[in-house]
Image (cartoon, grey):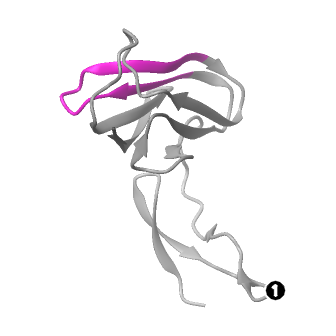
Amino acid sequence: MPGMLAWNSNKLRKMETAPLNNNFAPRVERDAARMPETAFGVRMLSANPFAGSARFGYQTVKPGNVSVAVYDLQGKRIKSLFAGDVASGAHAREWDGRTVQGKKAPAGIYIVRLEADGFSRSLRAVLTR
């Protein structure tokens, strides 16, 4: 089956999908380029756009210090979702759509930023009211 292009770790990589019982199995990377040893990304675990609250997931390859925060488009930190040490593996955090002062954040586009060991990844989340 021909490869597909997919965005992964700030690079376009060739991906392959293998059939399994007439369904498609998850994509498997063909190249083994070295990646940083901690956090590699953050993703939405809930719908985007969202109203009210949203859940975000991230993965760590080894234990380390991680921070997850929400910013507006001007770069102002709206709320810190987590800052501290984590074990390796999958983690999740939830944003209730409120600022650090407890007020409802206005509808708009926000950046969820994950930082670990000098690396950072981010995604856009759209809050509706």
Q: Residue at x 55, y 30 (%)?
A: 94
Taking 27 as reference, is 6 left or right? Answer: left
Identify the element where label 1 is drawn. Answer: loop
- The foreground one among 76 and 16 is 76
- The foreground one among 39 and 77 is 77
Q: Is residue 83 magenta?
A: yes
Q: Residue at x 40, y 19 (%)?
A: 79
Can you give x and y, in whole percent of width and height, for residue 87 in the image? 72, 26
Q: Amino acid at mark 1?
A: Asn
Considering every residue shown, the one lying at the far top of the view is 101
Task: Give, as a single range, the part of the protein colored magenta.
Answer: 66-84
Relative to 28, is 41 above or below? Answer: above
Q: Residue at x 31, y 36 (%)?
A: 110
- The foreground one among 21 and 119 is 21
Can you give x and y, in whole percent of width and height, for residue 63 in the image? 68, 26
Relative to 70, is 83 above or below? Answer: above
**Mark 1 neighbour class, 10 Å CA radius: few under 14, some 14 to 19, many 20 or more:** few
Can you give x and y, in whole percent of width and height, for residue 6 in the image? 46, 68
Taking 24 as reference, is 10 left or right? Answer: left
Q: Is residue 70 magenta?
A: yes
Q: Residue at x 73, y 83 (%)?
A: 23
Can you give x and y, in whole percent of width and height, for residue 45 in the image? 57, 46
**Badge 1 is on which residue?**
21
Relative to 77, is 47 above or below? Answer: below
Quarter where residue 127 is shown: top left
Helix, strand or loop for the magenta stretch, by majority? strand
- The foreground one among 66 and 37 is 66
